[in-house]
């Protein structure tokens, strides 16, 4: 995918399109993500509905801080990020002795 994106932005037609957008008033800016290693080496599984964060927001926080996100609980899971109606993932985490953290606890870990 990265190669396709790289190729797309090197194409002359893309450069022309970007120039036209800029001339039409579109302002481009750089987005710099503050990356940390606070969650380096940790793997999270999200379960249920979080009170304040969407799954996408929680995933971005984890990745931005060096962690990984997987969809299934395994012995390699570090934490289960627990929301409302967690279901079978919570049962599996308990069976494997994986700690479950609330959104509040998660935010403390990542800040």
Image (spheres, grey):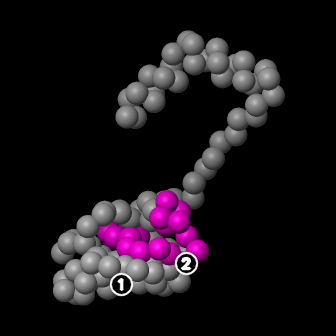
Residue at which label 1 appears: 100
Q: Nearer the viewer, residue 5 or 47?
A: 47
Please report the residue visible at 19 percent of the width from the left and 83 percent of the height from the top.
96
In the image, taking residue 92 as reference, residue 1 lies left or right, namely right
* Mark 1 element type: strand
Question: How far across and how far down the image is residue 23, in percent?
Answer: 79, 21
In the image, taking residue 17 as reference, residue 26 lies left or right, namely right
Question: How far across and how far down the image is residue 45, in percent?
Answer: 34, 70
In the image, taking residue 29 as reference, residue 75 lies left or right, namely left
Per the rendered image, the range of residues in magenta is 39-58
Up the image or down, 84 lies above or below 70; here it is: below
Question: How far across and how far down the image is residue 60, in percent?
Answer: 49, 60
Question: How far across and how far down the image is residue 21, in percent?
Answer: 72, 24
Residue at which label 2 appears: 51
Please report the residue visible at 76 percent of the width from the left and 34 percent of the height from the top.
27
Residue 78 magenta-drawn? no
Which numbered disc, 2 or 1, marks the residue closer to the eye? 2
Up the image or down, 18 lies above or below 69; here it is: above
* Mark 2 element type: loop
Up the image or down, 59 lies above or below 90; here it is: above
In the image, taking residue 76 as reference, residue 106 lies left or right, namely right
| Image quarter of the C terminus | bottom right
């Amino acid at each position: 995918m990265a190669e396709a994106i790289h190729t797309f932005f090197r194409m002359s037609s893309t450069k022309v399109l970007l120039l036209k957008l800029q001339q039409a008033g579109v302002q481009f800016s750089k987005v710099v993500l503050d990356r940390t290693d606070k969650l380096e080496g940790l793997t999270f599984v999200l379960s249920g509905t979080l009170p304040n964060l969407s799954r996408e927001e929680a995933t971005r926080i984890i990745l931005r801080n060096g962690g990984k996100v997987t969809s299934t609980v395994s012995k390699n899971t570090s934490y289960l990020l627990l929301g409302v109606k967690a279901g079978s993932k919570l049962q599996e985490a308990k069976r494997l002795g994986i700690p479950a953290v609330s959104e509040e606890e998660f935010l403390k870990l990542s800040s």
